[in-house]
Image (cartoon, rainbow, N blue to C red):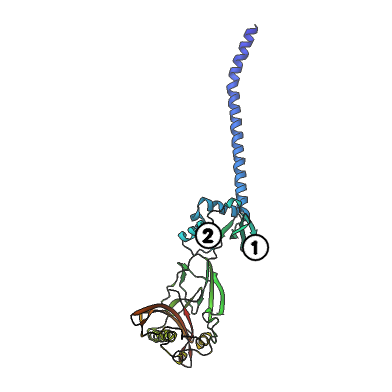
């Protein structure tokens, strides 16, 4: 009798157990899935929260730096910040900038000049300044966009006319970059030039290398200021005026060279100068007696370029080889000058001369 009951209980358990275990497996699976969903949601929430904070966004930025995701950072930078650098230069800059640093140890110090549009943070590792980051919050406020401030090169572009199609490294200039309207040009800054021309000035920074500035406007010309980080956009002279300007540029530059080497007298250069300018005053006290005696001089490979006219004046550049010979010894001076002229009583006189690097 007992054995029959026991056999019956065993058979009943055999019928119950598969269903019970299937139920347990179902409950376990649902629990695991729910757990994964909770963990996934928590991970997504933490990730989104990190992006929504400046510190978290900067940490993510440095994670991408360490992973070498430069193309991602480059494309992202164009979504919020203007990007005037090519990708290769940009990637190389970041790679070199942060090479050798443990970016996981980066600390951030918010700078006082942060404003409602942009925030700025100094990056510090082990007490040493590494770089400055610029942040801008996305419109949906769900993240911050980050870039490294590239302070290697900044420059201005000044419009002497109304040229429209001007490009910096292929990016068209818009009023987004406008810094000042109707302001005195830097072209005549510090030269005692009377009544300096008024211009519209645009400012650019975060440039790695000297930019390429071009215009599609057939009536305009781009001039690179040899004395500083500025470019000028102005009217291109017609053929008749260009010939006049080129002759004046050539004569003034060569007379200047001859005066330096004692092949021209002071009065010959003085009559070409605008009185009371800084350049004229400097030449009046210039000592040229140091130059070695020689037999002949000559000019070769003369090229005049970037000639631009503006109200009451013009600017142009010239480069050439100045060859000085003494007996059987010859010395060649490769020179680049940029000259500014002002019309005074119907005559164009030199108001300034800048010397360029070869």
Location of residue 348 in the rendering, given as x and y in whole percent from the top left corner: 45, 89
In front: label 1 or label 2? 1
The vertical placement of 25 against 239, above or below, is above
Location of residue 240 in the rendering, given as x and y in whole percent from the top left corner: 38, 86
Contact flag, marks 1 and 2 (Cβ < 8 Å): no
Location of residue 356 in the rendering, given as x and y in whole percent from the top left corner: 45, 76
- State the quadrant of the C terminus: bottom left
Question: Dot 2: few (<14), some (14–19), or many (≥20) neighbours within 10 Å?
Answer: some
Q: Quadrant of residue 17?
A: top right
User: On the rendered structure, is 19 left or right of 93?
Assistant: right
- Residue depicted at 42% across the width and 89% down the height: 264
Instruction: Choose between 75 and 189: the one closer to the eye.
Output: 189
Q: Which mark is residue 111?
A: 1
Q: Which mark is residue 136?
A: none
Callout 1: SS: loop
Alpha carbon of mark 1 to alpha carbon of mark 2: how far?
21 Å
The vertical placement of 96 against 14, above or below, is below
Callout 2: SS: helix
Outermost residue, left side:
328
Residue 10 seen by the camera: yes
- State the quadrant of the N terminus: top right
The vertical placement of 271 against 79, above or below, is below
User: On the rendered structure, is 119 left or right of 294?
Assistant: right
- Residue depicted at 56% across the width and 60% down the height: 148
Instruction: Choose between 238 and 131: the one closer to the eye.
Output: 131
Outermost residue, top side:
1
User: On the rendered structure, is 246 left or right of 113?
Assistant: left
Q: Quadrant of residue 37?
A: top right
Q: Which mark is residue 77?
A: 2
């Amino acid at each position: 009798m007992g054995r029959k009951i026991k056999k019956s209980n065993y058979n009943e358990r055999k019928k119950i157990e598969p269903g019970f275990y299937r139920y347990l497996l179902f409950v376990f699976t649902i629990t695991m899935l729910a757990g994964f969903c909770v963990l996934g949601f928590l991970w997504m929430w933490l990730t989104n929260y990190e992006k929504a904070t400046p510190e978290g966004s900067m940490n993510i930025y440095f994670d991408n730096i360490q992973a070498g995701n430069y193309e991602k950072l480059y494309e992202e930078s164009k979504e919020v910040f203007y990007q005037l650098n090519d990708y290769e230069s940009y990637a190389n800059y970041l790679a070199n900038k942060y090479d050798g640093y443990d970016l996981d140890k980066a600390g951030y110090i918010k700078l006082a000049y942060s404003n409602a549009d942009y925030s700025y943070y100094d990056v510090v590792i082990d007490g040493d300044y590494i770089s400055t980051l610029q942040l801008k919050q996305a419109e949906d406020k769900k993240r911050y966009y980050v870039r490294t401030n590239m302070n290697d090169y900044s420059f201005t572009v000044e419009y002497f006319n109304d040229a429209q199609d001007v490009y910096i490294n292929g990016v068209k200039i818009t009023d987004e970059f406008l810094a000042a309207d109707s302001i005195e040009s830097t072209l005549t800054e510090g030269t005692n030039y009377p009544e300096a021309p008024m211009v519209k000035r645009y400012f650019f920074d975060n440039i790695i290398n000297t930019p390429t500035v071009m215009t599609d406007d057939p009536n305009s010309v781009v001039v690179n200021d040899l004395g500083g980080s500025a470019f000028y956009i102005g009217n291109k002279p017609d053929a008749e005026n260009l010939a006049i300007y080129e002759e004046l540029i050539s004569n003034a530059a060569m007379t200047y060279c001859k005066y330096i080497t004692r092949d021209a007298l002071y009065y010959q250069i003085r009559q070409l100068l605008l009185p009371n300018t800084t350049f004229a005053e400097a030449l009046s006290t210039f000592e040229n007696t140091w130059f070695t005696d020689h037999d002949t001089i000559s000019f070769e490979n003369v090229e005049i370029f970037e000639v631009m006219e503006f109200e009451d004046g013009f600017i142009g550049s010239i480069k050439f080889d100045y060859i000085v010979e003494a007996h059987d010894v010859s010395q060649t001076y490769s020179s680049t000058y940029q000259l500014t002229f002002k019309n005074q009583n119907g005559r164009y006189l030199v108001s300034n001369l800048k010397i360029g690097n070869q």
